[in-house]
Amino acid sequence: MDYNRITPEILFEITAVVGNENVLTQRSEMENYSHDETEDLHFYPEVVVKPATPEQVSVLLKLCNQHLIPVTPRGAGTGLSGGALPVKGGVLLAMERFNRIIEIDEQSLQATVEPGVITEVFMNAVAQKGLLYPVDPASKGSCFIGGNVSHGSGGPRVVKYGTIREYILNLQVVLTNGDIIWTGANTLKYASGYNLTQLMIGSEGTLGVVTKIVTKLIPAPTQDVLMLASFPDNNAACAAVSAIFRAGVVPSALEFMERRGVEWVIAHDGIVFDLKDDAGAFLLIEVDGTNQEQIFAECEKINVVLEEFGCKDVLFADSSAQKEELWRMRRVMGISVKSNSVYKEEDTVVPRAELPRLIKGIKETGARYGFESVCYGHAGDGNLHVNIIKGGMSDEDWNTKLKDGIREIFELTVSLGGTLSGEHGIGLVQKEFMPIKYSETHFSLMRSIKAVFDPKGILNPGKIF
Ligand code: 2HG
Ligand code: ZN
């Protein structure tokens, strides 16, 4: 597709919509918008535009559609698949001024927010009212809820409370022709035709621009127990995961960390932790609820399973400071690897019981190709993040052979009944692997859907397929 460049006349029109102070054209000002958290990739837009209302987005999209200018919507830029990179230049639509929590409805347990609200800010606002919005990606302190919608984000609590898909009731979306629509209704049920809300979630800004979000809220649990269980090796830890559910417990978090990941955060992030020699892998397990007796009974059941699977040691967090530190250990793992090594991040997800086979295969592939990996993630969902570290690999092997290794990891994931990404999206960097899972029939359906919403292909081009 041949897109047009932004002429001075078009720039003048853009500026008239949002005001001079909300248009950036200098390369130095646009640096922050040229990358996300994906590896070390940089793409500069021609202009960064910061609208603040759906009406402004509407005029901008209509204008860009008319002139065939690519538009890349962007949240906070914490993405891990390159979904917000303006690979074709054009307009980078920065959503940061959409930062209002419009309403928290304590009667219907719903909230209406704008997409540029930081996820944790929103979580805290509803927590003050005794409510829970449980979608808490590791980057919750900096990511935007709009980006979470675009990527179908998850986080540790998905295992009990569900992904963002379960919490979005309705979306206000601006289409490329300038129409502003609501995708559904502010209701908990929806049986009236195609579900456009769900179609938008995870579409990575390729179908429309989300300008308001209606979320479901639930009563907040009042207590939790957090424990860190150590196992002799990856296999034992991963095998225990499905047994915990089979024992009748749904933990509010069930995270896996391999020893290498823990070593990494101790070395690079000032995490204080007494890492025993015989600890090969860990499960960070949280159980929450409103009834202490029930929580203790569930912990008891979990303990039986842990013992059965050779758990060496269980550390119960006995203060909120210790809980925070254990969570920090888990949450900084990805960013720790990224900021201290050349790396590639892959997101794999399989049916839960296949986790032991998945991690064994990842390590075998690494051994064959000569790369090291740090694996961690939301084991309760069968979702494993694989951070591949350049280590001793030559530049040539890193740039050529590694691709085959990654391909093998995804082939294994799919052969185990899984798929490419559990929660990071496809964006730019995973799209070449999509044919491992999806056929030409799937792509043709996806292209047809895209063409209905965005016939000229201006929205976030070059992503997903
Ligand atoms: C993690 O589990 C995340 O560490 C990283 O998937 C994604 O929140 C993020 O930025
Ligand atoms: Zn994750």
Image: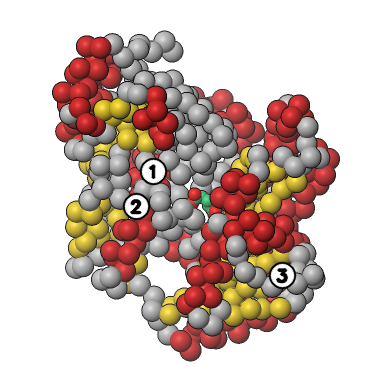
Q: Which residue is mark 3?
A: 275
Question: Where's residue 318, x and y in %?
Answer: 54, 82
| Proximity of marks 2 and 3: CB atoms separated by less than 8 Å | no
Marking on residue 76: 1
Instruction: Tell me which amino acid carries mark 3.
Output: Leu
Q: Is residue 360 above or below residue 3?
A: below
Q: Farthest residue in the front direction?
A: 28
Marking on residue 109: none
| Proximity of marks 1 and 2: CB atoms separated by less than 8 Å | yes
Q: Quadrant of residue 449?
A: top left
Q: Characterize the local packing of mark 3: few (<14), some (14-19) or many (20 or more) Cα atoms within 10 angstroms.
A: few
Tell me if 412 is positioned left or right of 54 in this view.
Answer: right
**Mark 1 or mark 3: which comes first in sequence?**
1
**Mark 2 or mark 3: which comes first in sequence?**
2
Residue at image coords 44%, 64%: 161
Instruction: Tell me which amino acid carries mark 1.
Output: Ala
Q: Quadrant of residue 414?
A: top right
Tell me if 363 is positioned left or right of 33 in this view.
Answer: right
Q: Is residue 271 above or below residue 215?
A: below
Query: How many numbered badges does the structure rendering display?
Result: 3
Tell me if 391 is positioned left or right of 81 in this view.
Answer: right
Quadrant housing the N terminus: top left
Residue at image coords 54%, 59%: 331
Mark 1–mark 2 distance (CA, rounded to whole Å): 8 Å
Question: Where's residue 389, x and y in %?
Answer: 70, 43
Residue 193 visible in the picture: no
